[in-house]
Image (cartoon, rainbow, N blue to C red):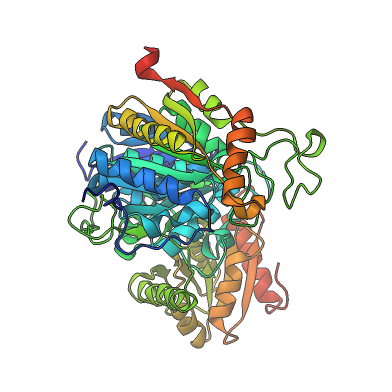
Amino acid sequence: MKDCEKVLIKGNYAIAQAAVNAGCQCYFGYPITPQTEIGEYLSGKMQELGRGYVCAESELAAINMVMGAVSTGVKAMTSSSSCAVALMQEALSYAASDELPVVLVNVMRTGPGLGYIYPAQGDYNQAVYGGGNGDYKVIVLAPSTVQECIDLTYRAFYLAQKYRNPTILLADGLLGQMMEPASFGKYPYPEIDTSAWALSGAKGRDARAIYSCARDEKAQIQHIKDLFKKFEVIKENETSFEEINTEDADIILTAFGSMARNIKAAIKVLRKNGIKAGYFRPITLSPFPSQRINELAKQGKDFIVVEMNMGQMYKDVKYAINGQSDIALVNRPCGEWLSVEEIVDSVKKVMEKNYATSL
Amino acid sequence: MQQVFSIPKSFKEGFKFTFCPGCDHGIAMRLVAEVIDELGIRENIISSTAIGCSVFIYDFLNIDCVEAPHGRALASATGVKRAQPDKVVFTYSGDGDFASIGLAESMNVALRGESITSFMLNNTTYGMTGGQLGPTTTMGQKTTTSPMGRNREYYGYPIKMAEHMALCDGTAFSARVALDSVPHINQAKAAIKRAFEVQLEGLGFGFVEILSSCPTNWHMTPEQAHERIKTEMTEIFPLGIFKDVKNNN
């Protein structure tokens, strides 16, 4: 297969093969639907390539294996889904404080609790705000196509190492199970030199210790401030989004992940109906493209946030708009994706009611 | 004059133990450091550290360390070893970390036969938090969370880790040693060395359970604490080598 050749591939397999291409040296995972294909694929592939693979005893163990592996400077990842990613939150807090380049793929399913295997986008808060303790931030990338599953898996490995920060690829069951044409290309990023901090045995240098234990109060205050300063740099350099027809738009539909596919179609229908609709999709959920949303709101453009949860990204968009224009939520907590027709109807209703209520 | 004792090179220069007076962590860490020196592996070793009093190993040993959350040291060590199969990887945990919160990780490392080495200090209590009931607290033992003593009804029974580890097919070496006397300390050092050797020889998982004192939380003098190890603890937790693939095969 040539690098640029298009193949028909399922989202989960695309993520798995992209991890291989990115140079992921170790994969550790525990099965959970709807992402199990990632671990199944990598169990054979990693052994074929002589790389590391462990069928971990739990998600707790899996992400801690990733932490151990990446502490030695290699690329490593785990993948899981919603309720099991909840088990990994402690480790993400440690990894953020330890500045370990952990890569975690979350192919979301329905919650809360065990929920079920139909898709949802209910882990926006879990990913962006985190369930771990203390002040920390992770990078969160949200693909909306199988092609982007590949592109953003590459980017996740790169950003994790570049900034020494845990990075989440936040996909969903729809995307994980969907087949689309996509091409892998070559891993497009430069290799990051980890030798200045990675553990390799204290040969010819002082011993290194990577830990988050913070006995010195002043040093800890500085450490947390430094982590947040680092994230400001990430925000400056890495915030990304996709924008279509926003220039003349009166109303901008916003969604993340695979929900964005339907708003892309919905704006075409709305425009045919004489409504000047635009499209805005955050690709990095963390850092969130607040500044761009704020600029658009300043121009008087209203926002409708469409998502498969009870309004999690909605709050961030509202915060970014900062009262400069109107905002409404079009949502369903889980299950069947909001159709183009449903979105179009909802947008019309919101406009009729002059944003008086959220649907 | 002949020098009969020196600080192992694997200790950091000018280190100062921060353990309670009479604590056996100092002896255990010294033995580990001496063995690392003798095997000449200091520059090729990585430790995944545990939580509890044992966490401070990275303050004292002059080796590369990565911290793991509570109970996850053996998962972390698995990750290190799978990423760097040529490095020597070990963990140094208390019984709470290894045998309670981390029991799943410990058992699974042994079952997978990870080529790593683990030491577990058994002092029958959670030391750092002030002496609560742990997985190895003996029947009848009073702790801050078993004020009337450990009983079957409320707490069940202590775990015998060295025996459990020996039952796992991936374990190459499992022993229980004690730090209450010079002969026992010498045996402990030999076991620690063997637990590293099975890793170096690629035979599987090496494990040593080390009976050690916690005079502060036992409310005893160091002498009384060592007497408790000798009389009471070794009755419940018998010393010995429970598995050594070299001898068994």
Q: A201 left or right of A267?
A: left
Q: Horizontal and vertical percent for residue A175?
A: 48, 47
Q: Horizontal and vertical percent for residue A115?
A: 67, 45
Q: Horizontal and vertical percent for residue B93?
A: 49, 45
Q: Residue at x 73, y 53 (%)?
A: B144
Instruction: Please tell me in which quadrant of the rendered image residue A287 appears.
Output: bottom left
Q: Residue at x 52, y 54 (%)?
A: B53
Total labels drawn:
0
Residue at the limit of the structure toward the left, as seen here: A204
Q: Horizontal and vertical percent for residue B170?
A: 43, 24
Q: Is residue A76 visible?
A: no
Image height check: is B39 above or below A165? above
Q: A18 left or right of A133?
A: left
Quarter of the image for the C terminus of chain B: give it. top left
Image height check: is B18 above or below A290? above
Q: A261 left or right of A44?
A: right
Q: Is residue A315 visible?
A: yes
Q: Residue at x 51, y 75 (%)?
A: A276
Residue at the limit of the structure toward the top, as seen here: B249
Image height check: is A295 above or below A11? below
Looking at the image, which is closer to me, A224 or A164?
A: A224
Looking at the image, which is closer to me, B44 or A145?
A: B44
Looking at the image, which is closer to me, B208 or A281?
A: B208
Looking at the image, which is closer to me, A154 or B44?
A: B44
